[in-house]
Image (spheres, grey):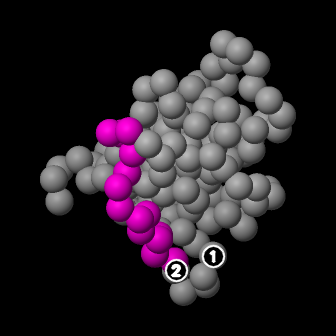
Amino acid sequence: MDDRSFSSYSGGASAVEEAPARPARSHDGRTLLYGNLEIRPDEVQVLADGQRVGLTVREFQVLLVLAQREERVVRRADIYDHVWGGEMKQRDRSVDVFVRKVRTKLSLAAPDWSYIHTHFGIGYRFAATPLNGD
């Protein structure tokens, strides 16, 4: 994957006010750690509590695009451009479908955490949020 810049939503009440926190990195410097989730870009692999989460390559790409922009709202069109390449056609629901698939798999693997948050009419934001209030 290349490292193209992404537009992030930066205005209005829905914007995140604070600077995004950097994810913890493991001893190898490549594995991204968020809550109980490990994202290993070099291996195209995700672990929750040490157990592999079975994501397809495209699902992994969607998750990685969001996770690398932690706490920032990423527009659907920007996700589409990075993962599928090119401009998103009007009424194309590919991003929404794949976000739903990733959410479902993450919620089964890590039921005490929420990772992908919807910003209606804009896009999605990645933030590791414990559901039990911890």
Q: Nearer the viewer, residue 129 or 89?
A: 89
Q: CA distance from mark 1 to mark 2?
A: 7 Å
**The quadrant where residue 20 appears:** bottom left
Residue 97 lies left or right of residue 18; in this view the side is: right
Other-residue count near label 1 (Cα within 10 Å), few / some / many at <14 / 14–19 / ≥20? some
- Range of residues picked out in magenta: 12-25
Mark 2: secondary structure: loop
Tell me, for residue 49, which label it has, or none: none
Q: Mark 2 = which residue?
A: 26
Q: Main secondary structure of the magenta part?
A: loop
Q: Is residue 28 above or below residue 121?
A: below
Q: Mark 1 = which residue?
A: 30
Residue 86 in the image, given as x and y percentages of width and height: 83, 34
Q: Is residue 39 above or below residue 111?
A: below
What amino acid is labelled 1 in the image? Arg
**The quadrant where residue 82 appears:** top right
Residue 114 in the image, given as x and y percentages of width and height: 35, 45
Mark 1: secondary structure: loop
Quadrant where the image shows the N terminus: bottom right
Other-residue count near label 2 (Cα within 10 Å), few / some / many at <14 / 14–19 / ≥20? few
Residue 85 lies left or right of residue 25; in this view the side is: right
Q: Residue furthest front?
A: 11
